[in-house]
Image: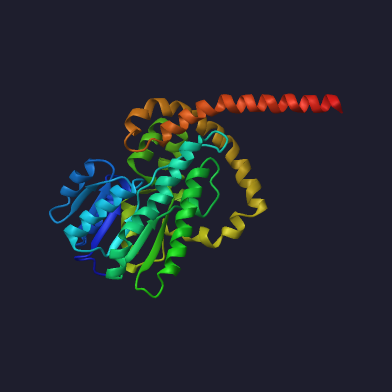
């Protein structure tokens, strides 16, 4: 698929960030792009790409709406050659502070939403012997303290891609997954503006070492992967090393190092996150409600956790007294 001219591409989460940047890159390469997002602004993003492209509003957590949107794309384009399942949200909180509904929502969007997207587009992709690209993360390769919901959802995306690749082998369809480090999207920018620790990670001297990239740089990598019908796309490319270092990264020795390094960082980050939830709740309500919901969940769970801890301490005291 070295020449993308005339290729018909569907991208979810295309109203902003990586999805919008990828759509722009593909359109510049001559592809016809259908941009799908839950925000109405996706129609204007599509209109700004010139004629021949399509903006469709649908939520990847709504199977009926997604099926209807894909049907609209097929009616307009006459088929699909590529689907990029990109829609996703970030969720940062430790497991003991994460509300169950917030965890489930992260998985529903990041993992089940990917499945819904691929399932809806798959008949057309099979017909064209096309390409499926699902968006995972480097978090699917390495442990992510404070990001259990996000990491679990992205690890599931990678596992889904690996299974789907084998299921479709011999049927002319290629399947790839993307694995990115920190990408400077507007949502990340909002958090960085109000959390100095995140700002240093995203914009500080260590940002290039950690692999921080712009949405446009990420889009360039995605387009290269689509051209090659790649099995894996890493952003930055050095992220591929993490794939081969998994046995080391997941060793007991690495657990000790990562847990020690993460402990102080998590305390500072989630202290700031609690304050951030109040100040950014309104502007993140449409874009991603996870920052706000996790901050609220922290406030709701903390008293329960304190109560539970008190109960455990009381029980322990009674046990000592009996001994």
Can residue 246 be seen in the rendering of this structure?
yes
Residue 306 position in % (x across, y down): 62, 25
Instruction: Please state if 276 lies on the left or on the right of 242 as rendered.
Output: left
Q: Residue at x 46, y 57 (%)?
A: 158
Q: Residue 292: horizontal and vertical position, in percent? A: 41, 31
Looking at this rendering, what residue extends furthest in the bottom direction? 170
Give the number of callouts.
Answer: 0
Point out the image quarter for the C terminus. top right
Residue 18 horizontal/vertical position (percent): 32, 49
Q: How is the image coloured?
A: rainbow
Please give left or right for residue 28 compared with residue 87 in the image: left
Report the residue that reaches farthest toward the right.
323
User: Which quadrant would residue 115 be assigned to in this image?
Assistant: bottom left
- Residue drawn at x 25%, y 51% is 69
Image quarter where the N terminus lies is: bottom left
Rendered view: 322 above or below 134? above
Q: Using the image, determine if residue 73 lies above or below residue 44.
A: below
Which one is in front, 89 or 168? 168
Q: Hey, which residue is sitting farthest left in the picture?
A: 51
**Residue 187's image quarter?**
top left
Residue beneath the point at 47% across and 42% down: 104
Q: Nearer the viewer, residue 80 or 151?
A: 80
The quadrant holding residue 7 is bottom left
Report whether 269 appears left or right of 187.
right
Residue 195 can be seen in this image: no
């Amino acid at each position: 698929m070295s020449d993308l001219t005339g290729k018909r591409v569907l991208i979810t989460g295309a109203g902003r960030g990586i999805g919008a940047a990828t759509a722009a890159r593909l359109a510049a390469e001559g592809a016809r792009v259908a941009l799908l997002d839950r925000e109405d602004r996706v129609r204007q993003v599509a209109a700004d790409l010139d004629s021949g492209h399509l903006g469709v509003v649908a939520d990847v957590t709504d199977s009926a709406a997604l099926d209807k949107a894909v049907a609209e794309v097929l009616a307009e384009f006459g088929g699909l050659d590529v689907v990029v399942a990109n829609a996703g949200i970030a969720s940062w909180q430790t497991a003991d502070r994460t509300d169950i509904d917030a965890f489930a929502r992260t998985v529903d969007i990041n993992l089940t939403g990917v499945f819904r997207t691929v399932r809806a587009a798959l008949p057309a992709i099979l017909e064209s012997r096309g390409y499926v690209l699902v968006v995972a993360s480097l978090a699917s390769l390495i442990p992510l303290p404070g990001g259990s919901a996000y990491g679990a959802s992205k690890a599931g995306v990678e596992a889904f891609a690996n299974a789907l690749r084998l299921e479709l082998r011999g049927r002319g369809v290629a399947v790839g997954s993307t694995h990115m480090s920190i990408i400077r999207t507007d949502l990340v920018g909002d958090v960085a503006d109000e959390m100095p620790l995140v700002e240093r990670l995203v914009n500080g001297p260590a940002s290039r070492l950690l692999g921080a990239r712009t949405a446009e740089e990420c889009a360039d990598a995605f387009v290269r992967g689509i051209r090659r019908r790649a099995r894996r796309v890493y952003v930055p490319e050095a992220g591929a090393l993490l794939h081969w270092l998994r046995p080391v990264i997941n060793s007991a020795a690495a657990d000790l190092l990562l847990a020690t390094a993460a402990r102080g960082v998590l305390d500072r980050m989630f202290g700031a996150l609690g304050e951030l939830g109040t100040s950014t709740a309104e502007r993140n309500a449409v874009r991603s409600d996870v920052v706000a919901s996790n901050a609220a969940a922290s406030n709701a769970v903390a008293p329960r956790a304190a109560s539970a801890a008190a109960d455990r301490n009381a029980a322990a005291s009674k046990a000592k007294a009996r001994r």
